[in-house]
Amino acid sequence: MTASGFDVLCIGNAIVDVIARVEDDFVSRHGLVKGSMNLIDEVRAEQLYGDMGQAIEVSGGSAGNTAAGVASLGGRAAYFGKVKADQLGSIFRHDMRAQGVAFDTEPATNGPATARSFILVTPDSERTMNTYLGACVNFTVADVDRKVVEAAQVTYMEGYLWDRPEAKEAFKLAAKIARAADRQTSITLSDSFCVERHRDSFLELIRNDIDIVFANETEIKSLYQTEDFGAAVKAVAADCPIAVVTRSEKGCAVVKGSDVLEIPAHPVNKVVDVTGAGDLFASGFLYGFTNGRPVYDSARLGSMAAAEVISHIGARPEVRLRTHAETLGLL
Amino acid sequence: MTASGFDVLCIGNAIVDVIARVEDDFVSRHGLVKGSMNLIDEVRAEQLYGDMGQAIEVSGGSAGNTAAGVASLGGRAAYFGKVKADQLGSIFRHDMRAQGVAFDTEPATNGPATARSFILVTPDSERTMNTYLGACVNFTVADVDRKVVEAAQVTYMEGYLWDRPEAKEAFKLAAKIARAADRQTSITLSDSFCVERHRDSFLELIRNDIDIVFANETEIKSLYQTEDFGAAVKAVAADCPIAVVTRSEKGCAVVKGSDVLEIPAHPVNKVVDVTGAGDLFASGFLYGFTNGRPVYDSARLGSMAAAEVISHIGARPEVRLRTHAETLGLL
């Protein structure tokens, strides 16, 4: 940690993605809902993997992808997340540090293996995720390094953490420390099923402890149980200082009180795999936001980062985003 | 093993590729020769990995890639190779079986970890490989399953096996079994440094125990210590019934006695990563050869398979090669 600290601290489930292309019938045959994230146990993980074709392994995890994106843009990023001291854990750690992210959460020496998400990419480039949380269940308040939280301008956390009571407590502790240090807090709602599972406590958190909410259109509608996008936007504006709502090819809306700023999507030649789109959008926005850029410019950086990550397999940037942004005249 | 057996049995070092894009100066800074394959120890592996950027993990290994290619074309492929019973070993095993390759070599339960090759892909799409052999050192004659060798039309082995005396013995045993069962044998010279290391014993083997040699232009010239391609072709024709010499974008030459058949390269839109080009060429040729196709058609299948694999990162086919070949009218 440098004296000047971090732009963004990301907290989330530390996961290695196991990605394979599948046909649509594979998804239906396994009783999965396309585009969803499912939590699976070890037995189910073995079954699914046994049935999957040849795969590639890439470090992932929603907030992990965001931290990698912030670092790739030249930002100072830190990360908290739990791997086990095993081969996949070493790979996850390497990839984080290689990207320039400060990542010092102690790996678990016993208990379940490093988490894996079996990601099925269908011909329409949609992804269906099946996550075995493994070592993530050992992430607790003890892993919240107070000094790092206090040193980060924004502490950003994934909603998925809410699925484990211990991780939820860690999340709440981090938010409390950040607030007490006059820092800002941010959450991504992660996915609409996650919102369904935790609607009331998400709302309570957002109303009291969050400065910036990230969500996509489905998630924000689910949070406020409305089919009316305008109504959802109005509701979130009342609950939180800033909300950033992504709408795929329709771009995104940044909501600040009664102001709603619409930003078009960044053009993409060919969508290959949508995994990580939301995570990388958040990285671009947060990089801009913590580096004194106006929200419009920050959202454009988010759009650019999302466009890069959906143009290839895997949820981490393949090029250095800073160079990419400079070439495009965005930085 | 079915009663009808296998088209091709591939024997080689079972390796997981760890692939990262690097700039040219990374290769020179580490004292590496671009395009080469270097054997490294565990300490060097740790140093190199620590210095590499974010990577992806994909199953590889020269003969492993060939087995995957044969299976992807619809052929009956088997594989012998040694992993450890660890996470990367499970990944390698899964990817082989998921592709339809029969792979039953017992994993090592102790000793070094599953082998990794740190593959550095430079902006010119060339790759420099740094291989930590790990568990491959435990591959011995005990791993040669006689029934599988006897059931395979062609037993194909990578020259890299020659780097370990125990693996070399296993290779020789497999060749002996195959010959005694009236089956055919094949070798790839692997790389020119490998030829330098083992020239005399490669020549002895080819003259006595091999039916089909695969090599690229550099390797065949190195084998016969000549700068004259024609002279090398003439020499190999005298030493072996069939030689298949690949020449990158110049296509390939199939040499049978005094006949030299030249086959143009398959067009490639954009070369992304040349890793696996030779391995996949061999898979296409061997699939055709063992399924009653003329050598010209077999070489075209090889060219097509090589073209697919160099159009993306990683040395295993990303599409089902059989479908691809059918679409192109090659099968």
Image (tube, coloured by chain):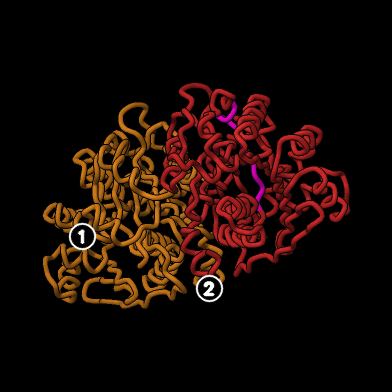
Chain colours: A orange, B red
Please tell me whether residue B206 is drawn above or below residue B264 in the rendered image: above
Q: Which mark is residue A192?
A: 1
Residue at (71%, 39%) from the top-left corner?
B210
Q: Is residue B42 left or right of residue B4?
A: right
Q: Amino acid at mark 1?
A: Ser
Query: Which residue corresponds to the image point at 57% horizontal and 43% vertical from the top-left?
Result: B153
Q: Which residues are magenta?
A: B127-137
Residue B129, magenta (yes or no): yes
Instruction: Tell which of B300 and A176 is nearer to you.
Output: B300
Q: Quadrant of residue A227?
A: bottom left
Going from the N terminus, do you reach mark 2 or mark 1 first? 1
User: Could you tell me if residue A93 is visible in this image?
Assistant: no
> The residue marked by circle 2 belongs to what chain?
A
Q: Give yes or no for contact between labels 2 and 1 (Cβ–Cβ under 8 Å).
A: no
Q: Chain of mark 1?
A: A
* Mark nearer the viewer, 2 or 1: 1
Viewer-proximal residue, B318 or B33? B318
Indicate yes or no whether the magenta region holds residue A254.
no
The Cα–Cα distance between marks 2 and 1, rounded to whole angstroms, is 33 Å
Q: Is residue B113 visible?
A: yes
At mark 1, the secondary structure is: helix
Numbered circle sitting on residue A328: 2
Looking at the rendered structure, the secondary structure element under dot 2 is loop
The image quarter in which residue B202 lies: top right
Residue A223 picture location, percent across and down: 16, 62
| Residue closest to the eye, A42 or A81 | A42
Q: Percent from the top left, x then y, of residue B24?
A: 69, 54
